[in-house]
Image: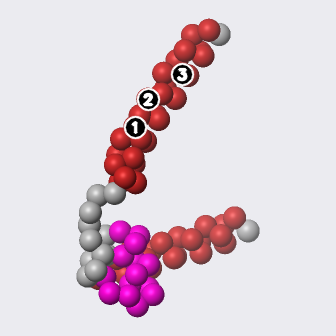
Amino acid sequence: MPTFTFAVAYFAAIKIERIKSTYALETYEKVVAFSEGQPIEKLTSQKTWKDTMSVVGVPATFLIVLLFSFYVFSLV
């Protein structure tokens, strides 16, 4: 069963990537708008707080977890 689930997910990912490259869709928001038949030109590429948090927050979280794990394992 896990193999079947993986195969279906892999097939869907390949189809989405082909659509993205054919129609020059860069973001998930544009893919959803395209699939719903909405105009893509209205969507702007402005940076949102989500973009900023993904660029700053993910490395910061990784660093915090890394330092915390060093601290915990130094106690052992």
Residue type, mark 1 in image: Pro
The image quarter in which residue 23 lies? bottom left
The residue closer to the viewer here, 46 or 14, is 46
Residue type, mark 3 in image: Phe
| Residue at image location 60% in from the left, 16% down from the top | 72
Residue sitting farthest toward the right: 1
Q: Secondary structure at mark 2?
A: helix
Badge 2 density bin: few <14, some 14–19, many ≥20, Cα 10 Å: few
Q: Is residue 33 left or right of residue 40?
A: right
| Residue at image location 73% in from the left, 68% down from the top | 1
Badge 1 density bin: few <14, some 14–19, many ≥20, Cα 10 Å: few
The residue indicated by pointer 1 is 59
Q: Residues under labels 3 and 1: Cα distance?
A: 14 Å
The residue indicated by pointer 2 is 63
The residue indicated by pointer 3 is 68
Residue 51 against residue 56 in the figure, above or below: below
Span shown in magenta: 27-40
| Whole-percent x, y for residue 4 in the image | 66, 72
| Residue at image location 44% in from the left, 78% down from the top | 32
| Whole-percent x, y for residue 67 in the image | 48, 21
Q: Earlier in the sequence, mark 3 or mark 1?
A: 1
Q: Residues under labels 2 and 1: Cα distance?
A: 6 Å
Residue type, mark 2 in image: Leu
Q: Residues under labels 3 and 2: Cα distance?
A: 8 Å
